Image: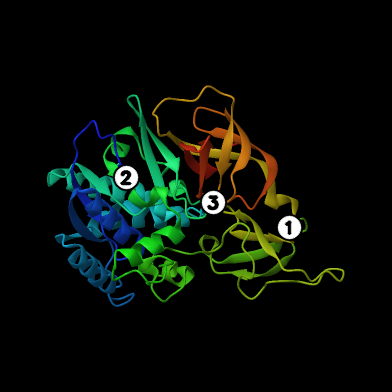
Amino acid sequence: MKFFDTSIEKKKVLIALSGGVDSSVSAALLVKEGYDVTAAYMVMYDDPAVQESCWIEEYRDAVRVAASLGIPIVKFDFTKEYREHVLSYLFDSYSSGNTPNPDVLCNTYIKFGVWLDKARELGFDMLATGHYAQVKKQGEEYFLLQGIDDNKDQTYFLHQLNQEKLSRVLFPVGTYTKQRVRELAVSFNLPTAKKKESMGICFVGNVSMKDFLKKHISLTPGNIVFYGTDEVIGRHDGLSLYTIGQSHFGNVSSINKGGDSRSLYVVEKRAHTHELVVGYDDCEKLFTHDVYLSFFHLISGVDLHYPVACKARFRHRQPLQDVVVTRYSDDLIQVHTKDVQRAIVPGQFGVLYKDGVCLGGGVISSPIT
């Protein structure tokens, strides 16, 4: 299988080998296809105060995979860049009351930013990763297509890439299902063939995100109030620690009002009063047909001809939603959904699709009225 336009000879590839099965199989496929492959392990976070270097065991697995494939492996330290581009954004966004998605920023500024720059600096033609996505070239334009495996498709996290970056990346497992990748890992006799899926964010370690944030951002406690009445029913530790749609927070997960003891959910965060507003799961505040996106980015670099009927998702693995996209203002795109949406979270990303192609997306925001 060819992973790029074979009319252009680009044979020297740097594969980002994370120590997981997806990047391991990606490396094996590239070697099998005859590319000149070098593996690279990238260290992005290392804080002994939080946990004992979470990357060490992953690095050992990456070394074992490289050895089994007979390819060289190098190690790079990008902890400084990760702090500057990802962690700083993470803390700023939480401090402003939003709930960010650091994986999108990591892909944009680190994996396909400084990693790609390093690959080119070292003379590599392409950077390959184990993402479940596809890149196709038609004419002079590059398109980011969804991975074959709908459940593993990772284009949501890659929607901030541009034409120049797409021209330099390879996603070897994008045309396979996860099950097939596992089978290939066994057939290649890779040391990571039976390795479990890694979950979560390395730098959080064995503590919750809430406890992690408490060490890095300033928090202002406030009242928990009931939607519609503003009755004070408890106290919270800081708005930054809560997400729209979240249930079972603090010591107040339900109240009994007129015999109704259903669980409560975060429906609003009032920054000006530091109030956390909660309501039942059918609270009107949780539902909307209109989502607004700021910092809107299109992979093609060319603006849309509004209105545009397409698909969208507002969180990873959400089924694609039918939408109509219009320009709301100079700074905002309005995405009107056919079906009502529950618990749209400011700070997350809304990503657009059409006919299996990822068009781009932006940060979920609120219009200024």
Mark 3 falls on what kind of element? loop
Between 184 and 121, the residue placed more toward the observer is: 184
Q: Amino acid at mark 1?
A: Tyr
Q: Taking the image as drawn, is residue 367 in sight?
A: no
Q: Position of residue 281 (x, y in %)?
A: 73, 60
Which label's residue is closer to the chain start, 3 or 2?
A: 2
Residue 218 against residue 9 in the figure, above or below: below
- Please state which of the two labelled residues, at mark 2 or mark 1, is closer to the viewer: 2
Asked whether the residues under the numbered discs 3 and 2 touch, taking CB atoms below 8 Å apart as contact, a structural biologist would say: no
Q: Taking the image as drawn, is residue 103 in sight?
A: yes
- In the image, taking residue 340 as reference, residue 18 lies left or right, namely left
Which label's residue is closer to the chain start, 3 or 1?
A: 1
Residue 212 against residue 174 in the figure, above or below: below
Residue 173 numbered tag: none
Local crowd size for mark 2, using a 10 Å CA cut-off: few (<14), some (14–19), many (≥20): few
- In the image, taking residue 292 as reference, residue 168 lies left or right, namely left
- In the image, taking residue 298 as reference, residue 328 lies left or right, namely right
Residue farthest front in this picture = 187
Mark 2 falls on what kind of element? loop
Q: Amino acid at mark 3?
A: Arg
Q: Which residue is mark 3?
A: 315
Q: Position of residue 6 (x, y in %)?
A: 25, 35
Q: Amino acid at mark 2?
A: Met
